[in-house]
């Protein structure tokens, strides 16, 4: 695994459904940062795009890659496998020193352990009640709502470990705060 000398890994984590993907993708598009997309064996939800939200693969393909040692980190959540491949991280870092991932606390800890101060954890959350209201407003299926609610307490407790914490109430306001925080981590070059 290459360790970025000048680059940074921005690790978006927090409570599921808090807006992590929306915020991360919007900022990365503006700043030209590369996404390292997780692989998962769960089925796509409505509006999820293969290769952008996740790369959706079969359990067999996941297990084969795992046995081959291709994953940087894996997790099993509600019976589904998730993981990010080492080669995808290395490729993204070599193309663009600034990369981002959207993962739970276990992968976030692993990024911190491996990349140290070059990994910046950005914790995004909203209250349980707010997540529920947003899910209901989007006609989210009940099983998906249950998934979000069941993980909330465990997920929210991780915020004390992260470098930066943001409550995502007004989306544009959150985006500008997160973006300013990310930019503050990027060294300015003097010529
Ligand atoms: N500040 C906000 N106000 C209202 N709705 C929001 C806000 N931020 C995000 N959303 C909406 O909330 C929903 C969840 O957002 P998003 O998918 O980005 O969250 P996530 O944390 O990545 O979720 P997941 O756990 O599914 O990965 C989306 O429909 C998004 O448009
Ligand atoms: N440890 C890892 N966690 C990951 C990875 N990719 C996504 N995630 C996190 O899993 C939960 C559940 O995701 P969902 O999309 O099914 O609701 C959520 O917190 C994701 O951020 C990964 O590669 N490793």
Image (cartoon, grey):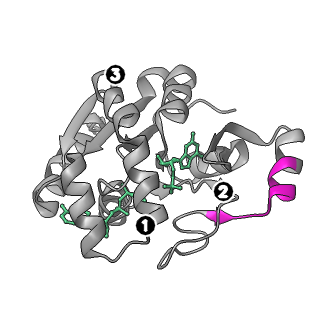
Q: Which residue is mark 1?
A: 142
Q: Is residue 47 left or right of residue 80?
A: left
- Residue drawn 74% across and 64% down? 57
Question: How far apart are labels 1 and 2 at the CA level?
Answer: 21 Å
Q: Is residue 107 left or right of residue 17?
A: right
Question: How far apart are labels 3 and 2 at the CA level?
Answer: 26 Å
Which numbered disc, 3 or 2, marks the residue that appears first in the sequence? 2
Does any atom of ligand 2 lie closer than 8 Å to the CB of label 2?
Answer: yes
* Picture layout, residue 151 above or below residue 132: above
Residue 132 visible? The answer is yes
Give, as a single range, the part of the protein colored magenta.
55-63
Q: Is residue 144 left or right of residue 22?
A: right
Which quarter of the picture shows residue 10? top left
Which numbered disc, 3 or 1, marks the residue that appears first in the sequence? 1
Q: Which residue is mark 2?
A: 40
Does any atom of ligand 2 lie closer than 8 Å to the CB of label 1?
Answer: no
Residue 38: give x, y in percent of width and height.
Answer: 60, 53
* Picture layout, residue 51 above or below residue 175: below
């Amino acid at each position: 695994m290459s360790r970025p000398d000048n680059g940074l890994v921005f690790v978006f984590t927090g409570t599921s459904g808090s807006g992590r993907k929306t915020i991360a993708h919007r900022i990365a598009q503006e700043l030209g940062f590369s996404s390292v997309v997780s692989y998962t064996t769960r089925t796509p939800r409505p509006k999820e795009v293969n290769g952008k939200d996740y790369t959706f693969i079969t359990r067999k393909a996941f297990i084969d890659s795992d046995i081959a040692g291709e994953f940087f980190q894996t997790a099993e959540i509600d019976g589904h496998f998730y993981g990010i491949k080492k080669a995808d991280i290395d490729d993204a870092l070599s193309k663009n020193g600034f990369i981002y991932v959207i993962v739970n606390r276990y992968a976030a800890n692993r990024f911190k352990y491996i990349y140290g101060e070059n990994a910046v954890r950005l914790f995004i959350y909203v209250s349980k009640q707010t997540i529920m209201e947003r899910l209901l407003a989007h006609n989210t299926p009940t099983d998906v709502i249950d998934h979000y609610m069941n993980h909330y307490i465990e997920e929210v407790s991780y915020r004390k470990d992260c470098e930066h914490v943001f409550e995502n109430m007004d989306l544009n306001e959150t985006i500008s705060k997160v973006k300013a925080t990310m930019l503050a981590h990027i060294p300015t070059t003097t010529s």
